Image (cartoon, rainbow, N blue to C red):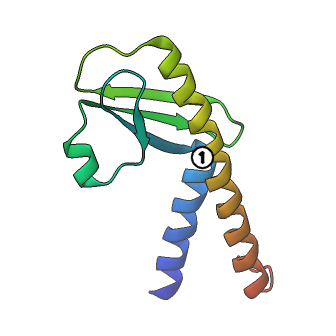
Amino acid sequence: MTLLICAAYLNLIYFIYIKGFFVTFSTKVGRTYIVDATEEEESQMSSAVSIAVNSQGHVCGITKRGGAGLDPSVLLDMISVARQVSKSLISTVDAEILAAETRAGGDI
């Protein structure tokens, strides 16, 4: 059972690592947005934009929910921030995988 859970966890990490991370921005008005807003913050926002960035820094998906249109310059700024956030998350995942492999003696 433990091995099965461990394998499922590693498959999930591998999937996220290869496919990328979604970074969600909640927007209020104009150029103001919050990265990965809390539920309370989201309840006060007019729309949300999610941007998926893979481990190579390529944008592989964008979704927008609610609200009016979005200024293209704001979207480009969000893409830049999403790349930075994803790079940080991928570095954290890499460090965790390396630590797990080290603890297991490389048998993962």
| Numbered circles on residues, count | 1
Q: Nearer the viewer, residue 33 or 6?
A: 33
Kindly state the secondary structure of the residue where label 1 is placed.
helix
State which quadrant residue 63 falls in. Answer: top left
Task: Give the residue at x 61% y 46%.
Answer: 86
The quadrant the C terminus occupies is: bottom right
The foreground one among 31 and 8 is 31
Which residue is located at x 56 percent, y 20 percent?
76
Percent position (x, y) of residue 16? 55, 52
- Give the vertical position of 27 relative to 92 (above or below): above
User: Above or below — where is 6 with respect to 38?
Assistant: below
**Residue at 71% of width from left, 57% of height from top?**
91
Q: Residues within 10 Å of mark 1 (few under 14, many from 20)?
A: some
Pick the residue in front: 65 or 1: 65
Residue 69 image offset from top left, x and y in percent = 31, 13
x and y, in percent, of residue 93 in the image: 65, 62
The quarter in which the N terminus is drawn is bottom left
Direction left: furthest residue: 43
Q: Position of residue 59 (x, y in %)?
A: 58, 29
Residue type of the residue flagged with mark 1: Val
Q: Is residue 39 above or below residue 27?
A: below
Q: In this view, does 54 lie to the left or right of 106?
A: left
Q: Is residue 79 left or right of residue 56?
A: left
Residue 100 placement, left or right of 42? right
Q: Mark 1 points at which residue?
A: 85
Q: What residue is at 68 percent from the left and 35 percent from the top?
A: 57
Classify residue 80 by image quadrant: top right
Q: In front here: 37 or 13?
A: 37
Above or below, 29 relative to 48: above
